[in-house]
């Protein structure tokens, strides 16, 4: 992910209609099943996660309390006094709250809240991430670390916007040393924008830290687990890989706020909160309350990848902050620290339980290795400084872990400089995988379906690491996830698949966006505090990821008259997979002519379509455009089919 200033220069305005076309005879799709081609990467289509648009805290990581450890730059952000009414008007004299640092719970998170109660009934409240979402009949674990020489209990109530109580619980029995206390609150009503109130009914002072309201219903019912509906959308894609944790978030605006994986593992209370680099990136959508608690850290990322059957692809800082911001760069004599982080990460993921970092992985609950096979060095870097630092990484990592493939950047743009210079160096250095990014107009994606047709097959492999069609302009706030953007990406993806021998991986970006707290659009999946839906672009990604074979099959035409095709062979399912994308406004009769195959029985068909290029999905209409399944009778090597207007159609044909 990147800042927009330079990227906008590359944007191309597109007409509303993708392809205008008159009535034609049947399109001939010739598929040469008798001559299967190269192998396709088993992790061809995957997902890219970055903590942008409140994708982690407030999203995939379902903690309901904002600033639970009081570590924001404004330590009381998110926390307010409950104002009571007296004859004299608003009265907050019942008590006060302040942030302290003496004898903290954890040195890595030194701030905590001290509440001083002058009169019983004093209260404070937190409204969470654009409100606290709770569901009727659901249970939430309310917990806090507490120490006190005064009040011995806390009443917690969850209320809606009118002040009506939806559920309550109580913590009690406190002592004068830090200790965790918890209870379960069951809510009676569904509410998107609730708040939690903490009341103190005894005089004195009381210290609180790591105040938490967490759903019991998490992915796989794990404590500190992930939001179930969002993970399910990811799992339904059957992605080949999971790239994490970003994006520009890896770099940080400055090196001091870069992503350091070691501070995101271990006990949650010890993970160091930092500001999110998307906090105030865009004037159109500032988010001063956007921080990273790292409740979702590297251990959870590896665990998520394993859960959804994806290969992990962590991206690490190479000693360079975001070049669109400060471009701060660590000196060459300081690079050892960054390289050691990479070596230690490989040990954390793959090392035996007798190793230092492998032991920590086991202590966190995963004795078995995570089978890390690739790692990214830098995100969207470019220039001589990047190449110089990569050489140090490559020498150290390849010497100790020659089987771990390294992913390098091709810069922020898909052509020109610095793209060309970087590629010249990567070819000379025989890099493993080169990460190319393109946030462009729908028209660009249609024109570039053959982008990789002539890439050197003996050179580095390709990772299409970040791409998304921009309906208006790069990162413009009025971009839409509509059918026009999605179908242009589908056409482009046929070209990725047809070049599956050189294109190893591809992922749409960004992945997640909160409808009330986004910074960048378009995005694959949108959500609010309780609901979520896959965009049109999500469903294109999903049907491609769920229908990718292991061998390339020659097909013609590949891109002609608004028709884009690809074909592959799924050895495991014994099925031929043919994809056809019709970007014209007209229905297209077509004949799929199979050379070397006389099918019989019934084929499976998946269709994604809309006659309205501006059509979108939404929270209220999550499947306005969604895949539809049907069947196709098979009787000969020529299959007569109908390609609907503006449609993506996938045929799965049994092969003996």
Image: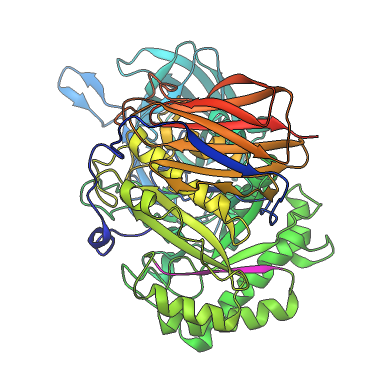
Q: Is residue 297 left or right of residue 403?
A: left
Residue 453 is situated, as x and y percent measured from the top left of the image, at 51, 61
Residue 399 is situated, as x and y percent measured from the top left of the image, at 72, 81
Q: Identify the residue at image location x=50%, y=85%.
A: 388
Residue 137 is situated, as x and y percent measured from the top left of the image, at 54, 12
User: In which quarter of the view is residue 335 placed?
Assistant: bottom right
Q: Is residue 109 left or right of residue 604?
A: left
Q: Is residue 559 left or right of residue 6?
A: right
Q: Is residue 8 above or below residue 618?
A: below
Q: Main secondary structure of the magenta part?
A: strand
In the rendered image, which quarter contains the N terminus? bottom left
In the rendered image, which quarter contains the C terminus? top right
The colour style of the image is rainbow
Q: Nearer the viewer, residue 613 or 288?
A: 613
Q: Nearer the viewer, residue 471 or 301?
A: 471
**Residue 535 visible:** no
In the rendered image, the residue lying farthest to the bottom is 333
**Residue 594 visible:** yes
Q: Is residue 270 above or below residue 603?
A: below
Q: Identify the residue at image location x=31%, y=39%.
A: 19
Q: Is residue 353 above or below residue 211?
A: below
Query: How many numbered circles are shown?
Result: 0
In the rendered image, the residue lying farthest to the front is 25
User: In which quarter of the view is residue 390 placed?
Assistant: bottom right
Q: Identify the residue at image location x=43%, y=27%.
A: 609
- Write the start and end of the magenta stretch as one range: 404-411
Q: Is residue 385 magenta?
A: no
Q: Nearer the viewer, residue 325 or 65?
A: 325
Residue 372 is situated, as x and y percent measured from the top left of the image, at 71, 59
């Amino acid at each position: 992910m990147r800042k927009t200033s330079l990227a906008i220069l590359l944007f191309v305005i597109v007409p509303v209609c993708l392809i205008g076309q008159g009535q034609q005879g049947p399109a001939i799709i010739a598929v040469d099943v008798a001559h299967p081609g190269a192998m396709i990467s088993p992790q061809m289509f995957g997902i890219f996660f970055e903590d942008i648009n409140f994708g982690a805290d407030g999203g995939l990581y379902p903690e309901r309390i904002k600033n639970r450890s009081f570590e924001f730059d404004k330590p009381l952000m998110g926390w307010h006094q409950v104002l009571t009414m007296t004859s004299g008007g608003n009265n907050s004299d019942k008590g006060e709250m302040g942030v302290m640092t003496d004898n903290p719970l954890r040195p890595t998170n030194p701030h905590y809240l001290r509440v001083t109660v002058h009169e019983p009934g004093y209260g404070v409240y937190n409204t969470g991430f654009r409100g606290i979402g709770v569901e009727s009949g659901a249970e939430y674990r309310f917990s806090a670390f507490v120490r006190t020489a005064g009040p011995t209990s806390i009443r917690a109530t969850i209320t809606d916007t009118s002040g009506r109580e939806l559920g309550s619980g109580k913590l009690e029995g406190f002592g004068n040393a830090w200790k965790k206390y918890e209870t379960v609150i069951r809510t009676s009503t569904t509410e998107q924008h609730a708040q939690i109130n903490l009341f103190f009914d005894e005089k004195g002072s009381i210290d609180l830290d790591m105040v938490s309201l967490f759903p019991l219903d998490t992915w796989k019912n794990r404590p500190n687990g992930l939001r179930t509906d969002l993970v399910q959308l990811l799992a339904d894609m059957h992605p080949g890989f999971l790239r994490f944790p970003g994006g520009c978030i890896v770099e940080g605006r400055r090196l001091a706020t870069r992503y350091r994986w070691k501070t995101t593992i271990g006990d949650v209370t010890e993970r160091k909160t930092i500001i999110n680099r998307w906090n105030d990136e865009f004037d159109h959508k500032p988010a001063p309350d956007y921080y990273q608690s790292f409740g979702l850290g590297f251990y959870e990322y590896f665990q998520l990848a394993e859960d959804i059957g994806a290969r992990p692809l962590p991206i690490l800082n190479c000693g360079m902050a975001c070049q669109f911001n400060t471009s701060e760069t660590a000196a060459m004599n300081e690079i050892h620290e960054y390289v050691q982080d990479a070596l230690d990460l490989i040990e954390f993921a793959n090392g035996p339980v007798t190793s230092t970092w492998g032991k920590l992985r086991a202590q966190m609950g995963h004795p078995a290795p995570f089978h890390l096979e690739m790692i990214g060095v830098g995100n969207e870097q470019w220039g001589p400084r990047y190449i110089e630092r990569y050489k140090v990484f490559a020498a150290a990592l390849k010497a100790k872990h020659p089987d771990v493939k390294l992913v390098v950047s091709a810069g922020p743009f898909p052509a020109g400089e610095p793209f060309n210079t970087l590629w010249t160096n990567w070819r000379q250095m025989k890099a493993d995988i080169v990460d190319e990014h393109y946030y462009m107009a729908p028209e660009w994606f249609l024109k570039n379906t053959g982008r990789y047709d002539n890439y050197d097959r003996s050179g580095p492999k390709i990772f299409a690491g970040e791409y998304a069609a921009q309906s208006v302009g790069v990162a413009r706030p009025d971009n839409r996830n509509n059918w026009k953007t999605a179908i242009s990406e589908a056409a482009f993806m046929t070209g990725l698949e047809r070049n599956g021998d050189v294109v190893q991986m591809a992922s749409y970006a960004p992945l997640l966006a909160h409808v009330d707290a986004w910074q960048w659009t378009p995005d694959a999946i949108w959500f609010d505090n309780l609901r979520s839906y896959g965009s049109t672009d999500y469903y294109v990604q999903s049907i491609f990821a769920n229908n990718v074979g292991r061998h390339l099959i020659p097909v013609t035409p590949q891109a002609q008259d608004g028709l884009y095709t690809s074909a592959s062979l799924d050895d495991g399912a014994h099925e031929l997979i043919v994809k056809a994308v019709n970007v014209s406004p007209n229905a297209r009769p077509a004949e799929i002519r199979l050379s070397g195959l006389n099918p019989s029985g019934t084929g499976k068909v998946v269709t994604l379509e809309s006659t309205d290029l501006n059509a979108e999905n939404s929270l209220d209409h999550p499947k306005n455009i969604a895949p539809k399944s049907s069947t196709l009778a098979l009787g000969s090597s020529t299959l007569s089919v109908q390609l609907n207007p503006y449609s993506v159609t996938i045929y799965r044909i049994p092969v003996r």
